[in-house]
Image (cartoon, rainbow, N blue to C red):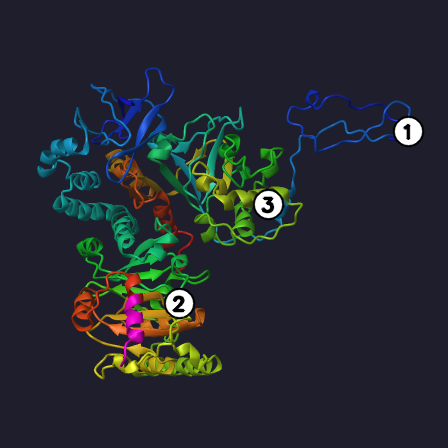
Amino acid sequence: MGGKTKVLLVGPTSQFCPVATRHCPAYATYGNSRPVKVAILEMPVARKRLRELVNSQPPATPLLPLTHTTDVYGLINALDDQELVPHSCDVFVGEPLLYFFYGRPSYRVNSNQPPTSLDHYLPVCLLFRSASTFPIKRIFPFDTGGFEKDLYADALHKDMKLEDFGLDPDPSTPGKVISLFFGTVDAYLRARPLSALKLDPKELEAISFHALISSRLSNNVDNRSSGVEIQLEGRLDLRGNIEAIILPGPLLESQQISAKLSQGGIVPLPYPQIDRQRPSEYVTKIFDLCYEYYSRVGPLNVS
Amino acid sequence: MPFLVGFLDPNRGAFGFLIPLFANRYGANYNLVQDIAPDDRVKAFLEFEGSVNCVSQSTSEVKIGGKAFWAFRYQDRISQGTSEELTTTLLPLLSQRSFSNTPLLESEIARFCGQQDIYYEALLATFKFLKVFSATAAEIWRDTVVLLPVAKSELATILPRDFLAKNPSLADARAWTQEKDLVVELPRRMFSQPTFATGWNELPKTTELAKLFDLQKIVITQSPRPGESQENVAVGMKGAPDTWQVRRDGYMAQSKNKKTVANSTSSLDRGERLSEAERIKNKQNKREKWLEAERIRTSQHKRPASRHTVNPSPSRPVPVIKPPAYILEPAFQFRSECIQLIQRHDWVVRTQAENLLALIAVREGRIFSFGFAYSSEVLAWTIDTVSHIYPGYTRCILANFYPSEFEVATSKKDNINIRHVSEFESFFNWRATAPS
């Protein structure tokens, strides 16, 4: 630089990068004068505090399968096509993605959807084989749809961006999140975060996330806020990848569907459709079926 | 008032229940679905992302608090109306076993219509149907979908209120089977204080359903501690939680470190088969060690004598409880260690009936907990827990009676009538001040 450099960039942030933040100043010199520090460029790079903190953790074991929740129509199409087809959403605009949760049978919130939809009302949850390796695009510690819909606004600082919570797209990352915030896989599945978590005060994102998953802010948030979201890009071949499906009982009695499940060696876990229409405190939860499956034949089975 | 705009058919033309969709006004952006309460009334309407794919011929109106609206497609016909109206339509079809080829659906319809016999048959048919896919899937369905919700609803009516206060919806409860036992596991956090089971009763509906699947016994247990396996919980290894069993006579009994699985192995005999004599000897050794530890602990923390008396209020003279008012009958089935505990702690024991034991824990002249159980071991453990956690308590009364006969027995013999926990207090005070 030699101490004399012309102006590199000056101007309002919005002229340079639409996603820039004001937290990343760059340095420049102006004219022939001696170098001066000028905060002129805001880098489109997210804060990496949470990412680095998570990376420093040992991954919790056992590994859990990925889950993908869809509705009856989504299941039938997927079984017909033998693949999951990514679609665009309103969070990562223009990027066709497939969304999964790590282990939890959660469903994703779309910001333009009302609270209840068929995949919420009569969900179909695909449990993938743990051994499957998928090309991971992004990992977030929570449902990004909920973030976009401002469901977490009470727990997060207004300046926090979604990118600040982006984690390494590595298969071990969800286990590290569990290790840090939940302690055990069982606690993660039951959405019971560690109550006493000592974090350095500078770990703003981690502190906010812990507050989010500890507070149960409202029914809208429920346990999705603490479900690790995994995004994949590209189509996903389902052949040999699905281990079990949680689905409305009567759907299993469709000869087409039962035949395809038998062919694929997929374990059906049916639940009563009518209970979803008439919810009460003691109806079967989708989670109960998933947890039992994990406990008896899945990753939580210790025998 | 929301009106019906059509149905969403999740089964794409197959037989089954439809989702009625409503709207608040014509041209509304969203449809609405009913949020139906357990009493079959509409609790609320929820916005719903999903459009009508099955047209309704009517535009029935449904209001919050009114009877829920149901719809069912059979062949080309859609039946709709309240649950009573739909039941009237479905019953003939159900009786003709029109849905016997689809047992999952048949079981839902039979449950909806309250047809227990057909429901049970459909459950067994479903179990068989699922076994074709996977025996595990069938068992998960039986335990989680059929038995657990019924057990939860029954437990919710009989568990002590302070148990339920910590987990009103019995979240995280599980059910599974071991051999011929149905094990219902309740979260450990519900059991975190020395609260005793009061009025625990039988689980008739769960028992009936369990018998349908050839299960013989129901065992209630706590979830394992972190790092502890389910097996440890079930076999009652050292440090494992206690279990409650529904006995043949319908009541629950808690058992500490009791084996509940016929073929399971304890920590001592795991990996090596011990003879029956060796097992008994090991058990006796463990008991003796425990009693010795108890003796040491008690001698180290002996309470002052004044605490053995009750002082309900400063203005009243200190009453002296006369243990002979309650007699430990020789024929009573306490084990020797339990008797030792009673004598050591100067507990007052009375027996009037058989089998059921009751414990009343008193602190500073006031009842703070009471409970029933069948096992002397349980009460020994319970009393011990109380003395650990509430060292300030003064006295426990250990009684032995049937709860159903209790009122009669006490009324006849003692001229008192106890219906509620608060009345135990007056009972105790009466006893405390009564001359011997």
Q: Which residue is located at x 86 percent, y 26 percent?
A: A5
Q: Are marks 1 and 3 on the same chain?
A: yes
Badge 2 amino acid:
Ala
Instruction: Determine the residue located farthest toward the front in the rendered image.
Output: B315
Residue A275 position, x and y percent, is 27, 39
Residue B18 location, x and y as percent?
25, 29
Horizontal side, residue A48 vs residue B372: left or right: right
Circle number at residue A138: none
Do the residues bearing badges 1 and 2 touch, measured as CB atoms within 8 Å?
no
Q: Which residue is mark 1?
A: A34
Please, is residue A88 above or below residue A52 in the view?
A: above
**Chain where mark 2 sits:** B
Residue B433 located within the stretch drawn in magenta: yes
State whether the magenta stretch is mostly helix, strand or loop.
helix
Give the distance between the C-alpha atoms of the residues marked 3 and 2, in whole angstroms: 35 Å
Task: Name the side, left or right, on which B26 lies relative to A42.
Answer: left
Local crowd at mark 3 within 10 Å, few (<14), some, or many (≥20)? some
Q: Quadrant of residue B70?
A: top left
Q: Are marks 1 and 2 on the same chain?
A: no
Q: Please tell me which residue lies in front, B217 or B383.
A: B383
Secondary structure state at the residue bearing disc 1? loop
State left or right for residue B298 relative to residue A167. left
Tag 3: residue type? Ile
Question: CA gap, disc 1 to disc 3?
Answer: 41 Å
Query: Looking at the picture, how far across and down is residue B236, in whole percent?
Result: 36, 69
Mark 3 and mark 2 in contact? Answer it, CB < 8 Å: no
Q: Which residue is mark 3?
A: A207
Q: Which residues are magenta?
A: B426-436
| Label 3 vs label 2, nearer the camera | 3
The crowd level at tag 2 (other Cα within 10 Å; few <14, some 14-19, many 20+) is: many
- Quickly name the residue at label 2: B240
